[in-house]
């Protein structure tokens, strides 16, 4: 009842033109407001039983049908309302439907006129959101409708009482594909949350947001894919900045098919475009250094596997002068093998970087802490993995991860060092510590030997870790899977340990 009185007070303060009266109205004359954000009313059985026994204790709020679209100044006064006409329900839609089930013929209603369409929507929106009755999509669509009708975010805040940050979040939700969102909401195994929706906001492209939402298999997987897509967007922007820098230096992109490590070119500069471990500030600093590049030789640039290369054309005398068919064939084969090996190495490096980035975010952002420290299956799997792979378990890895500044005099005193480190590591869950050891040891792991052969032992460790990280949302693409299981055509046929 207190909430109803507050709503009435809010309605009274919307405009001086508002008029209202209360009376019993035939249920047959009442309809749902077409702009009501709530489309599903849920199970009405209990409410219908209660109404059947006690009747309707709270008034419904209704407006004459013609007031939906009429400007406030043109809406009829109370004496001008046709009482035999149709009325739209602003507040009390569930009560109306439950009353129909209970067999009631009339309902107590408060008739209101003088509300603009924007105010009508604001009232319905607040009513449903206070009761948590709206789906995620319905909330977003409602705010978007208010914007479309001319309200600003500040207007919506004043009318609904919701913070600006909440409004902006809901507006981003409204941009998503409704069918995909509904599918995930209805999937009980997915357990879609508002935190998942906020994770999608890291991605600028709405199209990519929908792709991630559609591809995701669960809540944690969605957050991982969202992080990955956001990183890819950053890398694309960095590539654009790199290309602009090259254009300013009058360096053209190398012809398609040119290998950065080919016999005719040599690399003079390389920049990692990855957004996982390099800040925008560091990237811009590298570009500034490139802008000082001076050369009188023919230059070119290319991008491959997340790296951008500045290359210099070799002088003719630097290039091999062997011309026999046999020598050329041998050189071509060796060159192709080198190119393939480099591609595999970079693909594997990207997989490792993705794993390490996920581990870093999992721990620093305190994601899924319960599942990390509390699920015996996961901690046991991590412990067995550490033992099997004989990974180093030491305070050094924890120091590096958290960037602790340990004084030399403490480090030189074993007892004091152990005491300090014990105090620092005590709050860190055992599962988190094990993930950090993996993060530390995997930095330079690769699935390919120097000559292009498949490194089955190293790749097997990465595959096993990928399976463990699946519980945290990690997933492999088909190409990444082929890199780790050895089926990639880029490997040479022979392998060690086969």
Image (cartoon, helix red, strand yellow):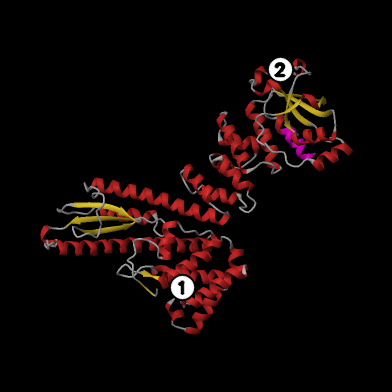
In the rendered structure, find residue 54 and report the number of the disc placed on it.
none
Q: Secondary structure at mark 2?
A: loop
As measured in the structure, the alpha-carbon distance from the residue carrying label 1 to the one carrying label 2 is 75 Å
In the rendered structure, find residue 397 and report the number of the disc placed on it.
1
Examine the structure image and report whether residue 6 is included in the region drawn in magenta. yes
- Is residue 212 shown left or right of residue 328? right
State the residue in front, 461 or 20: 461
Q: Locate the C terminus and report the quarter of the image it occupies.
A: bottom left
Magenta part of the chain: 1-9
Q: Residue at x 62, y 43 (%)?
A: 136
Q: How far from the left and from the top, in percent, is residue 309?
A: 27, 56
Q: Secondary structure at mark 1?
A: helix
**The image quarter in which residue 286 lies:** bottom left
- Is residue 96 shown left or right of residue 70? right
Q: Is 95 placed above or below 234 here? A: above
- Is residue 82 shown left or right of residue 184? right
Q: Locate the N terminus and report the quarter of the image it occupies.
A: top right
Q: Tell me the residue that label 2 is attached to.
A: 76
């Amino acid at each position: 009842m207190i909430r109803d009185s507050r709503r009435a007070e809010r309605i009274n303060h919307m405009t001086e033109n508002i008029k209202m009266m209360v009376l019993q109205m035939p249920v047959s004359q009442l309809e749902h407001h077409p702009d009501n954000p709530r489309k599903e009313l849920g199970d009405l059985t209990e409410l219908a039983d209660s109404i059947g026994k006690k009747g309707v204790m709270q008034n419904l709020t209704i407006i004459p049908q013609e007031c939906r679209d009429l400007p406030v100044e043109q809406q009829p006064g109370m004496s001008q309302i046709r009482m035999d006409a149709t009325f739209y329900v602003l507040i009390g839609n569930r009560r109306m439907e439950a009353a129909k089930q209970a067999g009631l013929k009339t309902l107590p209603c408060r008739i209101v006129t003088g509300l603009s369409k924007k105010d009508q929507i604001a009232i319905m929106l607040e009513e449903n959101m206070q009761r948590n009755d709206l789906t995620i999509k319905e909330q977003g669509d409602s705010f978007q409708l208010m914007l479309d009708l001319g309200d600003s975010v500040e207007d919506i805040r004043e009318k609904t009482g919701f913070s600006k940050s909440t409004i902006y979040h809901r507006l981003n939700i409204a941009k998503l594909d409704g069918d995909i969102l509904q599918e995930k909401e209805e999937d009980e195994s997915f357990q879609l949350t508002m935190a998942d929706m906020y994770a999608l906001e890291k991605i600028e492209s709405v199209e990519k947001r929908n792709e991630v939402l559609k591809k995701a298999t669960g809540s944690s997987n969605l957050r991982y894919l969202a992080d990955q897509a956001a990183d890819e967007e950053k890398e694309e922007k960095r590539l654009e900045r790199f290309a602009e820098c090259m254009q300013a230096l009058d360096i053209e992109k190398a012809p398609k098919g040119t290998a950065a490590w080919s016999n005719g070119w040599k690399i003079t500069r390389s920049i990692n475009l990855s957004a996982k471990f390099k800040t925008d500030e560091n990237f811009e600093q590298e570009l500034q250094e490139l802008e000082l590049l001076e050369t009188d030789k023919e230059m070119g640039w290319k991008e491959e596997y997340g790296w951008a290369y500045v290359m210099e054309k070799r002088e003719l005398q630097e290039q091999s002068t062997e011309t026999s068919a046999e020598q050329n064939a041998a050189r071509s084969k060796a060159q192709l093998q080198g190119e393939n090996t480099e591609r595999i190495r970079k693909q594997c490096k990207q997989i490792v970087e993705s794993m390490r980035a996920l581990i870093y975010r999992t721990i620093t952002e305190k994601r899924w802490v319960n599942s990390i420290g509390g699920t015996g299956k996961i901690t046991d799997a991590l412990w067995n993995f550490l033992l099997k792979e004989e990974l180093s378990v030491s305070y050094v890895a924890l120091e590096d991860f958290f960037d602790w500044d340990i004084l030399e005099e403490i480090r030189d005193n074993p007892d004091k060092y152990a005491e300090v480190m014990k105090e620092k590591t005590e709050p860190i869950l055992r599962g988190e510590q094990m993930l950090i050891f993996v993060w530390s040891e995997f930095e330079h792991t690769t699935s390919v030997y120097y000559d292009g052969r498949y490194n089955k032992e190293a790749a097997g460790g990465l595959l096993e870790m990928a399976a463990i990280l699946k519980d945290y949302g990690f997933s492999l693409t088909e190409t990444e899977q082929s890199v780790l299981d050895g089926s990639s055509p880029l490997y040479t046929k022979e392998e060690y340990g086969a």
